[in-house]
Image: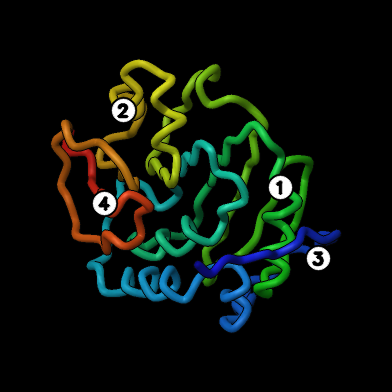
Amino acid sequence: MPFLNFIEKAVSAQGLDLHNKVISSNLYHHLLDEELNYLKQLNSIPKIALDTNYPILLYPGSGSDILYPLFFLGIIDNLQQATLIFIDIQNNLGMIKSILDDVGISFAEDNNTIAFYWKKILIRLEFRLNSFFSMELPRFDIYFERKFAIFREALENYELKIVEALNKKGLIISDYGFKNFKFEQMTVPAGLSSYSEMILGRKIT
């Protein structure tokens, strides 16, 4: 089975650059061919409108997985700026900065927050070193989950808490669960899920 072995490196902040261009060939350092092919299929999904052009995305157990959520942001209509709240018990911000640098994205940095342009969308990423299960949930517009199914079994009514904290017309993007809730669902490649299932759903009420 193929695997990726990218090593974290020391990267200094070079500031914001609106004209960042992704080095496409270097995406293969961080994504398998199959993964990248599935992510490219997101371009065929009709754009989704949110109630805000400045959404907050919440990603529990994020690790250093920066590229997946960035690709998914491409399905949102008229997106100007997004705040990504990454939560993990291990500090993966150094690896995230290494990945961005490798694919040609420069960034500005302030403590545990970095800012950069991704396809001319201003991204502000806040990395919270914390246990997701012991923190108070903020309000958010996009819930992003990947490879987290086993960990969230530790919290009773996990999915209900997520849906309640999700803003009106917010999105659930998850590779597992949320089958007992009514969403306006869009088709997304099941191959993007580690569990062969994906949900891309907009909160109805």
Q: Which residue is mark 4?
A: 197
Q: Which residue is mark 1?
A: 93
Disc 2, SS: helix
- The relative height of residue 19 versus residue 55 in the rendered view (above or below) is below
Q: Which residue is farthest front? A: 1
Q: Residue at x 43, y 47 (%)?
A: 146
Question: Tag 1: Cα neighbours inside 10 Å, few (<14), some, or many (≥20)?
Answer: many
Question: Tag 3: Cα neighbours inside 10 Å, few (<14), some, or many (≥20)?
Answer: few
Question: Tag 4: Cα neighbours inside 10 Å, few (<14), some, or many (≥20)?
Answer: some
Q: Earlier in the sequence, mark 4 or mark 3?
A: 3
Q: Position of residue 84 (x, y in %)?
A: 54, 46
Residue type at mark 2: give it: Glu
Near-viewer residue (42 or 146)? 146
Q: Which residue is mark 2?
A: 159
Task: Give the CA distance from mark 1 to mark 2.
Answer: 27 Å
Give the number of the mark in front: 1 or 4. Answer: 4
Q: Which residue is mark 3?
A: 14
Q: Residue at x 34, y 32 (%)?
A: 166
Residue type at mark 1: give it: Leu
Residue 28 lies in quadrant: bottom right
Q: Residue at x 63, y 42 (%)?
A: 126
